[in-house]
Image: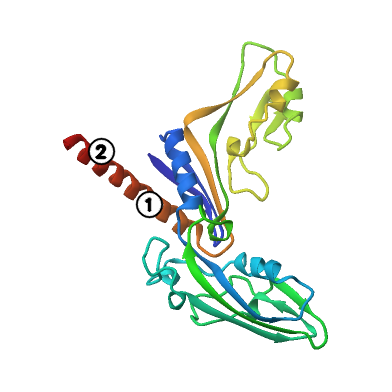
């Protein structure tokens, strides 16, 4: 199996995987979404809330506020499978005390751990009018996406099979199929009597045929079957996006580790069962 990174940033990663199988790709995708640990606010104690927002809605917004959850931040924290996970003291304490008039933002959350704080400072939480008071205590804990969306480290985690476009040289060139492409992948070159695949695409790290959505609009536009759109069965384009709480590379590496641990556990279980 080969991996080639097309682009990588703080919240997005696109890479090509070659010589892999669909079940393996789907396993990586699912583990990355639901089995990679992340930090989020779990318990909220609302001491006073004079705003027009219901307590339940405010608590929900706090839970969905992304918190820094990289490997350094996770170190030493209890996981849901640990016996002491539910203990109040094992979480990260947050305080929010504000008086209106003002808009309360995520930056107003004061953390007991300087490493673990909201990823973005400008997320609006609630608007306070003149004299309204907001007094909240909250506890953030490590969790998994399989339990709640607030613990899901990815906002986008998807793959598609590597597109493949071929031309039937035995029939007359059909230039209409190039004009039908909604993504501008194809370009008619009547001087050389060819239809070319555009190699570079604006605002996209993907090159050539990789930007193809395999919608087959070009195939339907061709009356003589000049163009065919398919895919390589063992090559894939994988995209991971996060809310900034974790770098996508860390999500991928952790997902691979978790999947490896699950495979080892299954093998040990099979061996123990077979010996009985």
The residue pinned by badge 1 equals 258
Quadrant including the C terminus: top left
What is the x, y in percent for residue 243?
A: 59, 61
User: Is 199 rendered above or below residue 122?
Assistant: above
Q: Residue at x 70, y 85 (%)?
A: 98
Residue 215 lies in what quarter of the image? Answer: top right
The residue pinned by badge 2 equals 270
Q: Residue at x 54, y 65 (%)?
A: 245
Counting residues from the start of the chain, the first of labels 1 and 2 encountered is 1
User: Is 132 rendered above or below residue 40?
Assistant: below
- Separation of disc 1 and disc 2 at Cα? 18 Å
User: Is 263 rendered above or below residue 134?
Assistant: above
What is the x, y in percent for residue 71?
A: 42, 66
* Residue that lies at the very extreme toward the right in this rendered image: 130
**Mark 2: secondary structure:** helix
Disc number for residue 144: none
Residue 187 lies in what quarter of the image? Answer: top right
Q: Is 121 left or right of 256, judged from the image as shown?
A: right
Q: Is residue 272 visible?
A: yes
* Residue that lies at the very extreme toward the left in this rendered image: 275
Q: Residues within 10 Å of mark 1 (few under 14, many from 20)?
A: some
Q: Is residue 191 visible?
A: no
- Do the numbered discs 1 and 2 sit on residues whose CB atoms are within 8 Å? no
Q: Is 233 left or right of 263, judged from the image as shown?
A: right
């Amino acid at each position: 199996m080969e991996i080639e990174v097309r682009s990588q940033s703080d919240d997005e990663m696109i890479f090509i995987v070659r010589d892999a199988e669909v079940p393996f790709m789907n396993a990586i995708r699912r583990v990355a979404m639901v089995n990679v640990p992340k930090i989020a606010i779990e318990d909220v104690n609302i001491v006073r809330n004079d705003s027009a927002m219901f307590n339940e809605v405010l608590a929900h917004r706090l839970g969905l506020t992304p918190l820094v959850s990289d490997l350094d931040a996770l170190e030493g924290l209890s996981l849901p499978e640990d016996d002491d996970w539910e203990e109040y003291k094992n979480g990260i304490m947050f305080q929010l005390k504000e008086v209106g008039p003002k808009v309360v933002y995520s930056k107003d959350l004061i953390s007991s751990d300087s490493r673990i704080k909201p990823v973005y400072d400008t997320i609006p939480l609630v608007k306070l009018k003149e004299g309204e008071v907001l007094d909240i205590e909250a506890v953030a804990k490590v969790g998994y996406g399989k339990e709640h969306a607030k613990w899901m480290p990815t906002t986008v985690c998807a793959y598609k099979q590597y597109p493949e476009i071929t031309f039937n040289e035995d029939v007359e060139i059909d230039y209409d199929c190039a004009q039908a492409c909604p993504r501008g992948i194809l370009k008619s070159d009547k001087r050389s009597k060819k239809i070319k695949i555009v190699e570079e695409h604006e605002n996209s790290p993907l090159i050539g045929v990789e930007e193809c959505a395999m919608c087959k609009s070009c195939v339907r536009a061709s009356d003589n079957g000049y163009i065919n759109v398919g895919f390589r069965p063992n090559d894939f384009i994988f995209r991971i996006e996060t809310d900034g709480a974790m770098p996508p590379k860390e999500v991928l590496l952790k997902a691979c580790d978790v999947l490896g641990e699950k495979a080892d556990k299954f093998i040990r279980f099979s061996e123990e069962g077979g010996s009985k």
